[in-house]
Image (tube, rainbow, N blue to C red):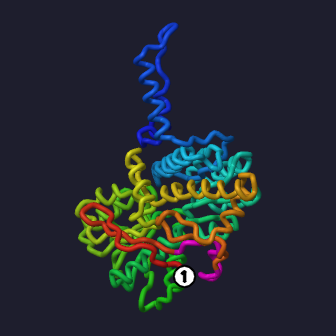
Amino acid sequence: MSKTVGRMGLGFAAVGACAVALTVGSVSLAAVSSQSSAHAAATKACPNPAKGSPVTWWQLGDENPQQNPTPENLVAAKLAATRINCSGGVAGHVLKVPACNSLADPNRAAACAKKAAEDKTTLAVWVFSQQAKVIYPILAKAKLAVVAPEALQPLEYQYPRTFAVAAGFQGLATGDAIFAHKLLGAKKVSVVTANCVPCQGLPDLIAGGIKAAGYSASQLSLTKSVYFPFDVTDMSSYAQQGADGVDAIMCFCGRSFTVRFVQTARRLGIKTPILAVDDNVPPSDAKAMGSAGKDVYFSGHYDWNNAESRMYRALMLKAKADPTGTAQSAWIGAKMLQDAGKQAQAKYRAVNSANLQKVMNSWTKYSTGGQTPPLDYKALPWKGSGGQLPRMVNRTVTFFEVVNGKLVQKSSFATVVK
């Protein structure tokens, strides 16, 4: 990791440069000069290094290289941790971000959750997993906070120690439907998706979100759901099924399939607008679509027009990692831990999971630097949406359009979960 972080200009490569070759019994002037210069560079890049005992923010994911490759999530967490550890850490403590990958297997997911729960240095956990039903009960026994998860299922907003920053799968699904209606005039929409665990609940999520937003069936309705297997080789039939009789197609196809689906649909002459989600699809995919990207739109969680988002995106691209919305959740969460840790140390004289939860639950206008609206955890539980999402603090999405191979932001912070 030190080489990657060094490319990012965050200090650890510069620190490594301080080591110089010694000649027997002496040090050359060139080495002394090199050492001095390297030390100055390291100090500038890492001006206030954390030196306290480590605290841990476990990253629990289920990346599957064949089905849903998301290596950028851990890259974002490590870059954020480096940034924080070079600016005082979490109230002086060094923030560690180890990962445990379940490969979407429930037994592996349980083992990962137990590893985090049994680690005495664990401060909080980050979750992006299809296996939430397995993970969260284990975290509950340990009373651990889940900070900035990329929530795929409603139960993650029902966990009393969730400190989400975005509307998750529910917001993106509902957002695409509302976007299709408001900006494209669609009345009938379909959803095409991989046959994954959370995807099986998509029709109910979308239909419920449309109804909660106040639309009648004649105004906006989900008319069909099309599922494809992860080992699909030809997406033609799924594209055709998704397009028949609708005004817009919602493609929740995941990292491995979105570009293929779009290109297949356009090759078949399907001109129906396609809406996807940016949170697990990188901007590079928009470029890869080429001319097929016309009338393709994305919903995402975060606004790009602020210094924090620009820094995140620049650092990720330097690290040759895709700056997806899911990875940005980890970027935001690490900063939340630093801010909460500082306040916990000042108020309770100790940094631990319980004290962090007290601090975060007291926040009324927590700022993410413009990446999200101000977050009010003190106002929770939220009673909207039938009381099924009590810990959903941010119920907005941001919309994008593919224009000449680039994702262009069209709007921000549209409230879609009601």
Near-viewer residue (104 or 11): 11
Say how many tags the image has: 1
Front one among 267 and 391: 391
Residue 359 seen in render: yes
Give residue 143's position: percent from left, percent from top: 74, 59
Residue 385 rendering spot, x and y as whole percentages: 59, 81
The answer to whether 192 is drawn above or below residue 350 in the figure is below
Q: Residue at x 43, y 66 (%)?
A: 303
In the rendered structure, does residue 69 fall within the stretch colored magenta?
no
Residue 78 drawn above or below residue 266: above
Q: Which residues are magenta?
A: 383-395
| CA neighbours of label 1 inside 10 A, class few (<14), some (14 to 19), many (20+) | some
Q: Quadrant of residue 266?
A: bottom left
In the structure shown, which secondary structural element does the residue marked by tag 1 occupy?
A: loop
Q: Is residue 138 visible?
A: no
Disc 1 designates what residue?
418
**Taking 108 as reference, is 193 left or right?**
left
- Examine the rendered structure and indicate whether residue 233 appears above or below residue 82: below
Q: In terms of secondary structure, what is the magenta stretch mainly?
A: loop
Residue 168 picture location, percent across and down: 53, 67
The quarter of the image holding the C terminus is bottom right
Residue 233 located left or right of residue 403: right
| Residue depicted at x 66% and y 70% | 158
Q: Nearer the viewer, residue 148 or 104?
A: 148
Name the kind of residue labelled 1 in the image: Lys
- Residue drawn where x is 23% and y is 63% of the image: 291
Q: Position of residue 281 (x, y in %)?
A: 41, 59
Q: Is 181 or 244 nearer to us in this picture?
A: 181
